[in-house]
Amino acid sequence: MNEEHTPRLHTQERKAQIAQAALELAANGIRAVTVSAVAEAVGVVPSALYRHYKNRNEMLRAAFMHLRSMLEENVRASSMEPDTLIALERFWQRHIGLILSQGAVPRILFSEDVAGSGSPFRDMLIAGQDNLVAGIAAIIARGQEAGTIRSDAYAKDLAILFLGQMLLPVHMHFIRQGEFDLQAQVQRNWKVVRDMLRAKRPEEETA
């Protein structure tokens, strides 16, 4: 597409537009994110992309950071709930909603091109995982202090357990190409996990 017909944007706006385009293309696989495909999606000539990113890897890195910021915003928004169990429920609802709306998420999570030992993005993926676990652990720790979440396990371990309830269903949804009710499965999982996380009342402990 001729760049003359594309509205001029400020540098940061254009960079964000490119990152979003790369993320949307990644829904078809990481290898679908090419310079020419991103340029076409944005509506500029390929050479114009190099004003903002040095190469394809930088575009992908920006796309992954954009996704990471959305995940972190889900944690932040959910943590505003004063009730810890409600906060965790709001998070998984937002998290599954993001996965369903952003087809790139499972492609990134389960891609050897991203997670493989030789990938330039592996460290970024690990850092994103660590931040997500830390954010959920902070919510759980708050509940432990308030006495609403069980205190006989580390908050980090409970956070990994909580996040794990979504991982296999997401993979099942991914490999079945949508022919699996992801939201309904996680809803059922949550009922079990919620009871596992909840602090027992005194009468339950003596029963």
Image: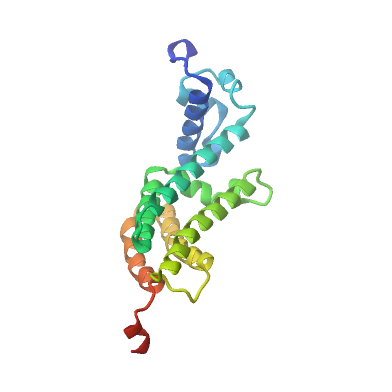
Residue 12 shows in this picture: yes
Q: Nearer the viewer, residue 157 or 178?
A: 157
Place of residue 195 in the rendered image (x, y in percent of width and height, measured from the top left): 36, 73
Q: How many marks?
A: 0
- Identify the colour scheme used: rainbow
Please name the residue shown 47% across and 18% down the image: 9
Place of residue 64 in the rendered image (x, y in percent of width and height, measured from the top left): 54, 41
Q: Is residue 125 above or below residue 186?
A: above
Please name the residue shown 41% across and 67% down the image: 146
Q: Is residue 121 above or below residue 138?
A: above
Q: Quadrant of the C terminus?
A: bottom left
Tell me if 22 is positioned left or right of 206 in this view: right
Please name the residue shown 63% across and 29% down the image: 55
Q: Nearer the viewer, residue 85 or 4?
A: 85
Q: Nearer the viewer, residue 72 or 67?
A: 72
Q: Nearer the viewer, residue 70 or 57?
A: 70
